[in-house]
Image (cartoon, rainbow, N blue to C red):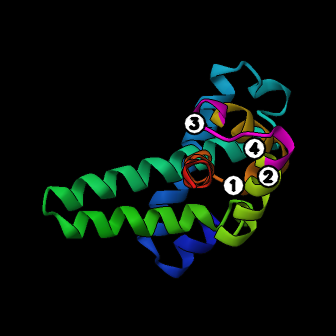
């Protein structure tokens, strides 16, 4: 993909993909798995989620600071990264999982949030962001 981006002259894509490649190599070195084939696919997916989240947080800060050009660049990078992530659950699908978890755990108040979030994360896997899950759980337990 880096080579294809280079050939097409897409500088932002090249820069973003090279950054991801570097992050993966650093993770390989940090976990001492570089010589044995590198980190596994789940670790790479988690790393990509982390990188996408970083881009969103940076964009939010740039927007607060009044730098819309930089925010747009961060969001464009995030979009490139998201293309390599598993499809995320829709709000409706996530709500259904949360409702099932609330019913299964008998949760009725905020102190039960951890049980519900844990169950939803186990069912959703990498197809739902932890912050999105927490948001829906909080909404459901307030009503």
Is 113 in front, or is 47? 113
| Labels 3, 4: front one | 3
* Closer to the camera in the image, 124 or 86: 124
Q: Does residue 31 lie above or below 81 as drawn?
A: above
Question: Which residue is at 48% across, 58% downward?
Answer: 16
Count neighbours of disc 3 (C-alpha within 10 A) and say few if under 14, some if 14 to 19, many if 20 or more: few
Using a 10 Å C-alpha cutoff, classify the residue at mark 2 as few (fewer than 14 neighbours), some (14 to 19) or many (20 or more). some
C-beta proximity under 8 Å, tags 2 and 1: yes
Q: Residue at x 22, y 70 (%)?
A: 69
Magenta segment, prevailing SS (helix, strand or loop) = helix
Do the residues under discs 4 and 1 have CB atoms within 8 angstroms?
yes
Looking at the rendered structure, which numbered label has been put on residue 128? 1
Real-space Cα distance between discs 2 and 1?
A: 6 Å
Q: Secondary structure at mark 4?
A: helix
Q: Which mark is residue 110?
A: 3
Residue 53 picture location, percent across and down: 49, 50
Regarding mark 2 in the picture, which secondary structure is present there? helix
Q: Which residue is mark 2?
A: 124
Q: CA distance from mark 3 to mark 2?
A: 21 Å
Which residue is outermost to the left?
Answer: 66
- Left or right for 100, reference 90: right
- Magenta segment: 103-112
Q: Earlier in the sequence, mark 3 or mark 4?
A: 3
User: Residue drawn 67% across and 33% down?
Assistant: 112
| In front of the other: 116 or 32 | 116
> Mark 2 and mark 4: span between their CA atoms?
5 Å
């Amino acid at each position: 993909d880096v080579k294809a981006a280079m050939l097409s002259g897409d500088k932002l894509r090249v820069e973003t993909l090279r950054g991801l490649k570097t992050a993966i190599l650093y993770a390989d070195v940090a976990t001492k798995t570089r010589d044995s084939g590198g980190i596994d696919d789940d670790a790479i997916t988690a790393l990509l989620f982390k990188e996408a989240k970083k881009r969103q947080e940076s964009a939010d800060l740039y927007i607060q600071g009044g730098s819309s050009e930089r925010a747009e660049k961060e969001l464009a990078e995030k979009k490139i990264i998201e293309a390599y992530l598993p499809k995320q659950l829709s709000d409706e699908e996530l709500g259904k999982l949360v409702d099932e978890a609330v019913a299964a755990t008998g949760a009725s108040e905020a102190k039960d949030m951890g049980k519900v979030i844990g169950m939803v994360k186990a069912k959703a896997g990498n197809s739902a962001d932890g912050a999105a899950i927490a948001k829906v759980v909080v909404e459901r337990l307030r009503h």
